[in-house]
Amino acid sequence: MPASPESSFVTVQGRKLEVRTIAGIHRDAPVLVFLHEGLGSVSMWRDFPEKAAQATGCAAMVYSRYGHGQSEVLCEPRAVDYMHVEALEALPELLGKLGIAEPILVGHSDGGSIALLYAAVRDGVTGLVLMAPHVFVEDISVKSIAAAKTAFESTDLPQKLGRHHADAAKTFRGWNDIWLNPDFRGWSIEEHLPRVYCPVLAIQGFDDEYGTMAQLEAVAKRAGGPVELLRLADCRHSPHRDQPGVVLEAMARFIGRLGEGA
């Protein structure tokens, strides 16, 4: 059995980030690096990273981005390029400090976008597992994010998020405000996809309330390397929560093939 997860803090760009590491069975296997969604954190992944480490034999690293989880609290509004900043500046520094080379990036929603941006500019990415990634802004995304704002203001959503974030209000507004900013409507990372050469497994639910299959189709059409698509019924925006068994099996197969091609 893998060792128990270890939690710590790592300073990146002058800010303390919450980090959790999980040992793997196969010492020479690449590390799974988990990149959470727009309202995500280490704790919101629940036990999925541990299960993924068990299913694949890989070690794993999970972290909360600045402004999320128990990482340093957000002090300023997000800018339109916040995912670019994470992918091009913060993530490389974090991986360097932890000595992680040639990772497999496992990204959910915003985390999937960050994974694609990182892979487009960095050599040595072994593979990408993307769950409900965003590559451009759709009407359905904006509509659902506006509905989330209403829910935050009128339901117990702040209390629920407060279980996972040091300052749930700042975390929520940091994500919600920029996605609803009119300047964000033109955000797209499609132009970067041709430079993503590593193998990609892209997963999305048919019932995703934050995006359509057009996101996966754009990745498949424009990525510079091989892309495998997994479209799931009875699945909303979080495939690892709605269909965990199917996702873990697909990840294990995909990562197994990566090892065979090494």
Image (cartoon, rainbow, N blue to C red):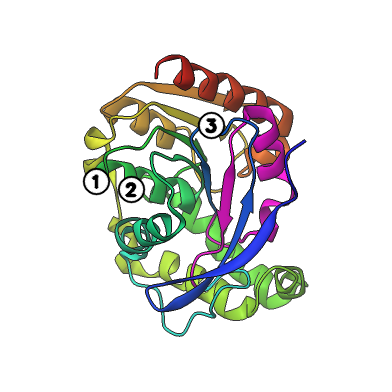
What's the mark number on residue 121?
1
* Amino acid found under the numbered disc labelled 1: Val
Distance of mark 3 from mark 1, alpha carbons? 22 Å
Labelled pair 1, 2 in contact (Cβ < 8 Å): yes
Which callout, 2 or 3, points to the residue nearer the camera?
Answer: 2
Name the quarter where the N terminus is drawn.
Answer: top right
Distance of mark 1 from mark 2, alpha carbons? 6 Å
* Amino acid found under the numbered disc labelled 3: Ile
Say what secondary structure mark 3 lies in. Answer: strand
Q: Which residues lie in the magenta part?
A: 37-66
Would residue 214 be found to the left or right of residue 160 on screen? left
Would residue 251 be found to the left or right of residue 217 on screen? right
Would residue 199 be found to the left or right of residue 46 on screen? left
Q: Which residue is mark 2?
A: 118
* Amino acid found under the numbered disc labelled 2: Tyr
Residue 134 appears in the figure: no
Q: Which residue is mark 3?
A: 203
Of labels 2 and 3, earlier in sequence is: 2
* x, y percent for residue 262: 39, 19
Along the line of sight, the residue nearer the viewer: 88 or 81: 88
Along the line of sight, the residue nearer the viewer: 3 or 111: 3
Distance of mark 2 from mark 3, alpha carbons? 18 Å
Of labels 3 and 1, earlier in sequence is: 1
